[in-house]
Image (cartoon, helix red, strand yellow):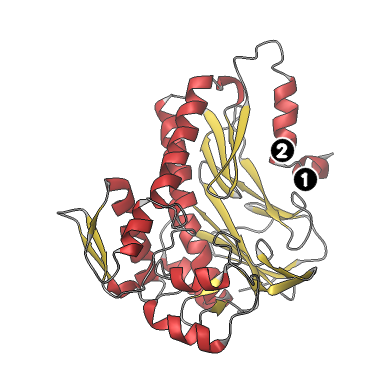
Amino acid sequence: MRNKLIFLTLTAIILITSCRRTEAPEIRPAMADFILNTVCVIILYDRGEAHIYEEIFARIREIESRMSAFIEGSYIARINRAAGIEPVRVPPDVFFVVERAVQVAELSNGAFDPTVGPIVALWDIGGRNPRPGLPRIPSQEEIDKLLPLVNWRNVELNRENQTIFLTEPGMALDLGAIAKGYAADEAAAIIRNARIPQAIVDLGGNTLLVGLKADRTPWRVGVQTPFAERGVYLGVVETWETSVVTSGGYEQFIIYNGVHYYQYHHLICPTLGRPAQTGLISATIITGVSMDADAFSTAIFVLGHEKGMELVESMEGMEAIFILEDRRIFLSSGLAEGVDFILVNDDFRIAGN
């Protein structure tokens, strides 16, 4: 029975909890919508009043409309069009996210870089910028032509004027590896302001746990088994109020003529301009701020196990789970095997650091 509970997906949770509330349709335990190019699920249990859900999803849509590089008229699109021309004045939330993205770029020595936009558009692995002839594998010549545009140091931030300037023509911001985390934090802020005692925010695998469970036991979050069906977990994180975010090369990849090219995934190494190949198949970050969990999970995937572990161990209040291609699992020093992380798949093994 315990294993069956572990393998419950959020979709199943929605169905189960919804059945309990048929007598009170104005209260919904969970709601979902497709925003930020992913399925966003909010679970408010027995406090799911319609106006709270409306406020949460409206805020997530607002973030998408402001921070997506693929929406005409968004602030990020305006910044990209003005690259090398002039600074663009932005709202405080856009400035805040871009500023944090640049900070993470510095902390990770460029493994996470918000100016990777030109390379992301070239590969278009997520299908956000469809063009004739895609998907395809870009040539090294095409990649080399764009690589000089990828440099977080060429993002000029003026806090006093709230402006952002990309100094080189052709540069482009892409906040795809941090905006979802920020949206989860904003959703949680609305939930806490409404004094809802416990909730789950799940934005396409970016999981943020709000409050404590009613029975005061730890939350249990599944870590996806790479290349398996969604909701099949290799392990469970037992934790309190925090955020759990996983980046994996199996999530988005090129499918060409019916063939799955897993090595060509969406997690781009900014210095090489190609999908990162570091021996990892997934990297999970556990920390209090979902925006940080989102960005650092990408950074450590690009860095690989050893350098990624060094980065995590240098960050206060941050833990990580690294899953290697040879099915070894490495845990950061603050995670205890069998307590904070419970392995349930015998095909994988926890290795010593």
Percent coordinates x, y for residue 47 in the rendering: 55, 21
Tag 1 secondary structure: loop
Quick check: 44 above or below 85?
A: above
Residue at coordinates 82% horizontally, 65% vertically from top-left? Answer: 347
The image quarter containing residue 267 is bottom right
Residue at the limit of the structure toward the top, as seen here = 23
Tag 2 secondary structure: helix
- Amino acid type, mark 2: Thr
Percent coordinates x, y for residue 248 in the rendering: 63, 64
Residue at coordinates 70% horizontally, 55% vertically from top-left? Answer: 224
Where, quadrant-wise, is the N terminus in this rendering? top right
Residue at the limit of the structure toward the left, as seen here = 160
Percent coordinates x, y for residue 128 in the rendering: 56, 59
Which mark is on residue 148? none
Examine the rendering and report whether any part of residue 187 can be seen.
Answer: yes
Mark 1 vs mark 2: in front: 2
Instruction: Identify which residue, 276 or 289, lies in the foreground.
Output: 276
Quick check: 191 above or below 49?
A: below
Residue at the limit of the structure toward the bottom, as seen here = 141
Which mark is on residue 11? 2
Give the left or right position of residue 57, taking residue 337 as reference. Answer: left
Quick check: 301 above or below 189?
A: below
- Amino acid type, mark 1: Phe
Percent coordinates x, y for residue 9 in the rendering: 73, 42
Residue at coordinates 49% horizontally, 60% vertically from top-left? Answer: 177
Q: Are marks 1 and 2 in contact (CB under 8 Å)?
A: no
The image quarter containing residue 351 is bottom right
Where, quadrant-wise, is the C terminus in this rendering? bottom right
Q: Which residue is mark 1?
A: 7
Residue at coordinates 61% horizontally, 79% vertically from top-left? Answer: 277
- How many C-alpha atoms fall within 10 Å of the one at disc 1: few (<14), some, or many (≥20)? many
Give the left or right position of residue 15, taking residue 340 as reference. Answer: right
